[in-house]
Image: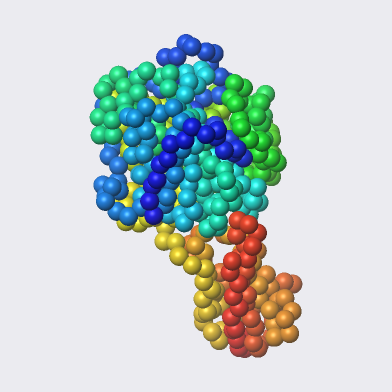
Amino acid sequence: MRTAVRKSCLPCLCLSLLIALIGRATAQSTNSAQPNWCGLQAAYGNYHSRIEPPSNFLMKPQTATILVTYTGFPAPAESAFAFTARIWASTLISSVPIRINARFEPLPGGVLGVTFPNVPDTLFNGRWLTSALADAITGRDLNPGQFDIDLHLNSAFAAWYFGTDGNPPSNKYDFVTVVLHEMCHGLGFATTCKVQSGSGSYGLLSQSDFPGLVFSFPWPNFSRRQDLFVRYVENAAGQRLTDTTLFANPSTALAAQFTSNGVFFNGPNAVLANNGIRPKLYAPATFSLGSSILHLDQNTYPPGNINSLMTPFAFPGISNHSPGPIILGTYKDFGWRIDSTVVGIAEKMVDVPDVFRLEQNYPNPFNPSTKIQFALPRESVVRLIVYDVLGREVMKVVDEIRSAGYHTVEWNGENTSGSRVSSGVYFFRIETKDVAGQVPFMSVKRMMLLK
């Protein structure tokens, strides 16, 4: 695969997006009023650190194609953007080109950058996800003729450093770091969590939440649906914030969680990448739309930490050209395939199979119980049902969403009523559903119960 860039003076293609607004606001600007949303904010401090990109990303074959349409970029900024795009194109795996509309223009309120990920109408197990990820999972362009990411950078900001060596002066903000951060949101690190009038919610973002921003496409209908990000968000007690029996959506209880300074991401790959510890998310006492929940915690991952790219504050004099293991872990939890040959950032990952597979049960024949294994290359709705020789349903062993990976379940030889079944031949059938609601995998195997 390759990374390609193209210049264009033509009008932008119409987008249909998810807006998980990711801005980088700076306190330096006095040109316009500060918007009521923010994101990764420019800050000030005596920090000097440099995190290099994956050591082999310029040499290895690219595993994704990123096509960038540039508008208003000076040559140094365009070169830095293309350098950043290559980092992601050498890390992620996708057979569908990722199209980015990159605009270098004045932004309101001193915002450094704003990212709008496109969202297809198709849901993934009842949840929405970004266009680039949906395309990668399905192998199809679900929004043909549209950009996957609309990324704006502030041309009025005077303190940019456009070099790609990762050595910005102490009074400059590293452009590559900002772009890498914004692209991370556009590719999948996005959610619709918000707090309004004391009530917390997800799936209820509206265009009016972002005054001063112009959108060239219809606002998505989230309809209170979860996104892949919020599915993994939980509190210190390990309670999923999407458990509506505990936290109604919307509710003051959900707002209290979003502002508790105790919110974590509990995806298996992200946890493994963080040495078995749930990565902590940014959840300050005052909710900040476009910043809270949508970033890793600043105090836990300070400047210089390998996982600091997706924290909510940027500092001059530092650079971070690596997504970091936690972010790649979250990406794999979302369903992205990560190129394992990228040195330095993909070593710690849960083993995920390349294809769907149903194994023969063991032991077989069996008495009184048997185990059944199956493999999922991505998160899927799974139905695993036992039938008798007449095709009648005996037991629904699995009927739920399962994450990517290898799974083992047990059937104890009972039917849905809890009664032991007679000896004989039985069949177990697995069916999975993908992002489009299609059935990419179905398999049936035979087993025997002896008494």
Up the image or down, 353 lies above or below 130; here it is: below
Q: Residue at x 42, y 50 (%)?
A: 65
Residue 281: in sight, yes or no? no
Q: Residue furthest top?
A: 30
Residue 37, given in percent of the width and then of the height, sits at 56, 24
For this view, does 79 lie left or right of residue 297?
left
Residue 411, given in percent of the width and then of the height, sits at 60, 74
**Number of numbered callouts drawn:** 0
Quadrant of the snapshot with the N terminus: bottom left
The answer to which quarter of the image holds residue 420 is bottom right
Q: Residue at x 32, y 29 (%)?
A: 76
Query: Foreground residue, 26 or 310?
Result: 26
Quadrant of the snapshot with the C terminus: bottom right
Up the image or down, 258 lies above or below 397; here it is: above
Residue 304, given in percent of the width and then of the height, sits at 30, 33
Q: Residue at x 46, y 38 (%)?
A: 69
Residue 363: in sight, yes or no? yes
Up the image or down, 209 lies above or below 417; here it is: above
The answer to which quarter of the image holds residue 199 is top right
